[in-house]
Amino acid sequence: MTFGDVITQARKGRQLSQREVAAKILKEDGMAISAQYLNDIEHDRRNPPSEHIIGQLAKILDLEDDYLFFLAGRLSSDVLELSRDRENISNAMKTFRRNLRGNSQ
C-alpha cells in the first residue's frame, strides 16, 4: 500500500470526508489544508507532506506516525537527531531490515 492508500483507507474507516479531515489539518502557518490537497495526497499525485502534516494525519486518523514516515520514505526529525555516527546508523539499518524480514516470514 502507498502513503495515499493508507490515508484513504484510514479516513474512510473512520467515516470522515476529505473535507472534514482537511479542516482539521493545519499547515505551519495555521491555515487548514484544502480538501483538494488531501485528495491529491490520497491519490499519490503529490509527494508525501511535511513532518508537521504527517503527525497531524497520524493523530486524526489514529495511525502510527512511524508507519506513515516509512511509507513516505522519510525519517522523523527525532530519529535524525539520535545519531550521526556512520557505524550506529549502519547497525540500526541492518537490525531494521532483519526485523522486517523476520516479521514477513
Image (spheres, rainbow, N blue to C red):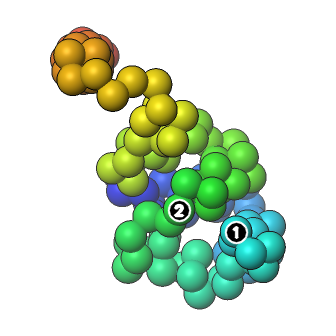
Which residue is painted at 44% across and 64% down in the image? 48
Q: What element does badge 2 sit on?
A: loop
Q: With respect to residue 88, does 2 lie above or below?
A: below
| Picture disc at residue 56 | none
Q: With respect to residue 39, does 57 lie above or below?
A: above
Does the CB distance between marks 1 and 2 fall below 8 Å?
A: yes
Q: With respect to residue 54, does 30 lie above or below?
A: below
Which residue is painted at 59% across and 87% down in the image? 36
Give percent across and percent down for residue 22: 71, 74
| Picture disc at residue 28 | 1
Quarter of the picture holding the C terminus:
top left
Distance from disc 1 to disc 2, alpha carbons, whole Å, reads: 9 Å
Which residue lies under the disc numbered 2?
A: 50
Q: Is residue 15 left or right of residue 57?
A: right
Which residue is painted at 80% across and 67% down in the image? 24
Can the viewer see residue 15 in this picture? yes
Please, what is the three-letter code of the amino acid marked with disc 2?
Ser
Give whichever of 86, 65 is nearer the camera: 86
Q: Is residue 80 left or right of residue 62?
A: left
Q: What element does badge 1 sit on?
A: loop
Q: Is residue 62 left or right of residue 101?
A: right
Q: Earlier in the sequence, mark 1 or mark 2?
A: 1
Give percent across and percent down for residue 53: 62, 61
Please, what is the three-letter code of the amino acid marked with disc 1?
Glu
Using a 10 Å C-alpha cutoff, classify the residue at mark 2 as few (fewer than 14 neighbours), some (14 to 19) or many (20 or more).
some
Which residue is painted at 80% across and 73% down in the image? 30
